[in-house]
Image (cartoon, rainbow, N blue to C red):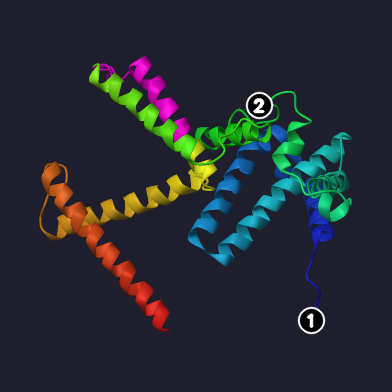
Amino acid sequence: MQPKPGLNEALSLMKDLRARCDWDAAQTHESLRPYLIEEAYEVDDAIRAGSDPALREELGDLLLQVLFHSVVAEERGAFDFGDVAAGFIGKMKTRHPHLYEGGEKQSWEGMKAKKRDSIVDGLPADLPALHRAFRLQDRAAGVGFDWPNAAGPAAKVEEELAEVRAEVNRGANSSGNGVPDPLLEDELGDLLFSVVNLCRKLGVHPSLALDKANVKFASRFQGIERLARERGIDVKTAGLEVLDGLWDEVKRNQTLTASTDASSGEMQ
């Protein structure tokens, strides 16, 4: 049985492609930026789908981006893949001083905070807003700006929701051209930020929680559309009362199916 290829073989192939493929040779760090983002999302999709073959393939595509940038940087005389690997090893050992340096276990955010002048240092500006909010709060917690437990952020959510209701009662709404009321937008932003903080304090990543909620909503609404087709109902003109009834029916059916599947799994 032949040994599986490793990083050295992958790196050699990348260098060969840069030397002999016109497209690969023409790429730069800048031109590769969209592919890096795309490949990261495709890895995420494979994880969401629970597909090991897809995950294996997409991780390879993501590795290609790491190798590609490393080789381009080496050609520029900036650094090479060995420097990337050395930086990774050094960072992981520093992150785990209790395992490699005979030190005490420490909070990673706490250690990073000592090296930063501000909580925004090194945080990509283009991170999705939900994830950026989470990371800002996580970094603030690393320097001690945090609630002692989840009761604080839960109360803050209620406070911000009350402020949103006050704006709604004031008559705040989107104008005719779709531009939101500035005060309402501000209060809704505060509410979302508070919900993110509550998620963080309860050990739930808001992006993952919202992703699951999106999947659940999409599945249930597709169930509505399916029932509507079977019963000759036009979803676009049915009205809220009819759609709400279909929603409740789909929800009951999905809950029953999930309960039945769980029971079958326990008996196996």
Q: Position of residue 69 (x, y in %)?
A: 76, 42
Give the amino acid type for the residue marked by disc 1 in the picture.
Met
Q: Nearer the viewer, residue 148 or 38?
A: 148
Rounded to the nearest angstrom, the CA distance separating label 1 from label 2 is: 50 Å
Quarter of the view holding residue 237: top left
Residue 83 sits above or below residue 166 on the image: below
Q: Give the quarter of the image for residue 229.
A: bottom left
96 left or right of 39 in image: right
* Residue behind mark 2: 120
In-front residue for pair 52/211: 211
Q: Is residue 60 above or below residue 191?
A: below
Which amino acid, mark 2?
Val
Asked whether 77 or 157 is in front, the reply is 157
| Residue 101 appears left or right of 225 | right
Q: Can see residue 67?
A: yes
Query: Which residue is pictured at 11% across the width and 45% down the height?
Result: 241
Of badges 1 and 2, nearer the viewer stands 2
Verify whether residue 154 appears in magenta: no
Looking at the image, tell me whether mark 1 or mark 2 is earlier in sequence order: 1
Give the residues in magenta: 171-196
Query: Residue 94's x, y, as percent?
Result: 83, 45
Cβ atoms at labels 1 and 2 below 8 Å apart: no
Q: Which mark is residue 1?
A: 1
- Spot occupied by residue 16 in the image (x, y as percentages of width and height): 82, 52
Could you tell me residue 146's position as x and y percent?
Answer: 59, 33
The image quadrant that residue 30 belongs to is top right
Q: Secondary structure at mark 1?
A: loop
- Residue shown at 34% from the left, 20% from the top: 184
